[in-house]
Amino acid sequence: MSFRPASEVDFSTRTTRFVAPAAVTNGEFGLFEWRMEARRPGARPHFHKTFSESFYVLEGEITLLDGDEWVRAGEGDFSYVPPNRPHAFRNDSDAPVRMLILFAPGVARENFFLEVGGAGDLDPDELRAFYERHDQYNL
C-alpha cells in the first residue's frame, strides 16, 4: 500500500507532517515529523493511557519532560515514554528543532493535530471532552 502524506499542519511556530499515520500501518504505529522554531513552547505536561510516545531528534536540541525531570536531547537522541508517564517538550535553544514522534500502538493521532486548532473555541467541559477523546490528559 502506498500513501501520500497529508498536508502539513502549520501552527505558526511549529509544523507537523504525518509521515506514516496509523491508517497505513494497520494501527501498529504512527510516525510524525515535528518542526519547531527557536525558543518556543511545545506540548505542555500530559500523559496518554493507551499508547506510548517516543521522540527521535533529527536536528537541533529539544528539552523533554520525562516524568518529573526536564532533560535535553540533541541530534541522534531517542526518548521512550510509556503509557501513563507524564511528558512534555519545548525548544529552549536558539535554533530550530526537527524530530520524529512515534505513537504505538498506532492511534489516529493525526485527528488530534487536525482538530486542536479549533479547540480554543470550546468551553471548559467541551475542551476536557476533546482531550479525553484523543487520550490526552493535561496536567
Image (tube, rainbow, N blue to C red):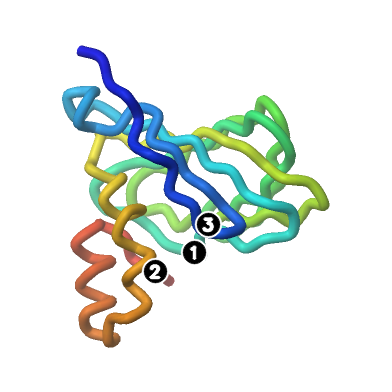
Crowding around mark 2 (Cα neighbors within 10 Å: few <14, some 14 to 19, many 20+) is some
Crowding around mark 1 (Cα neighbors within 10 Å: few <14, some 14 to 19, many 20+) is some
Q: In this orientation, which residue lies closer to the viewer: 78 or 19?
A: 19
Give the x, y percent position of residue 136.
32, 60
Measured in 3D between alpha carbons, the distance from the residue under mark 1 to the one under mark 3, in whole angstroms, is 5 Å
Q: Are marks 1 and 3 in contact (CB under 8 Å)?
A: yes
| Amino acid carrying mark 1 in the image | Pro
Q: Quadrant of residue 46?
A: bottom left
| Amino acid carrying mark 2 in the image | Asn
From the image, which quarter does the C terminus lie in?
Answer: bottom left
Going 61% across and 50% down the picture, which residue do you hit? 64
Q: Quadrant of residue 92?
A: bottom right
Give the x, y percent position of residue 49.
27, 53
Going 23% across and 41% down the picture, which residue do you hit? 107
Q: How many marks?
A: 3
As drawn, is 90 to the left or to the right of 82? right
From the image, which quarter does the N terminus lie in?
Answer: top left
Q: Quadrant of residue 78?
A: top right
Q: Are marks 3 and 2 in contact (CB under 8 Å)?
A: no
The residue that mark 3 highlights is: 88
Q: Are marks 2 and 1 in contact (CB under 8 Å)?
A: yes
Relative vertical location of residue 126 with respect to residue 47 in this rendering, above or below: below
Going 62% across and 37% down the picture, which residue do you hit? 98
Going 82% across and 52% down the picture, which residue do you hit? 94
Give the x, y percent position of residue 13.
61, 57
Task: Give residue 45's mark.
Answer: 1
As drawn, is 124 to the left or to the right of 73? left
Task: Give residue 138's mark.
Answer: 2
| Amino acid carrying mark 3 in the image | Ala
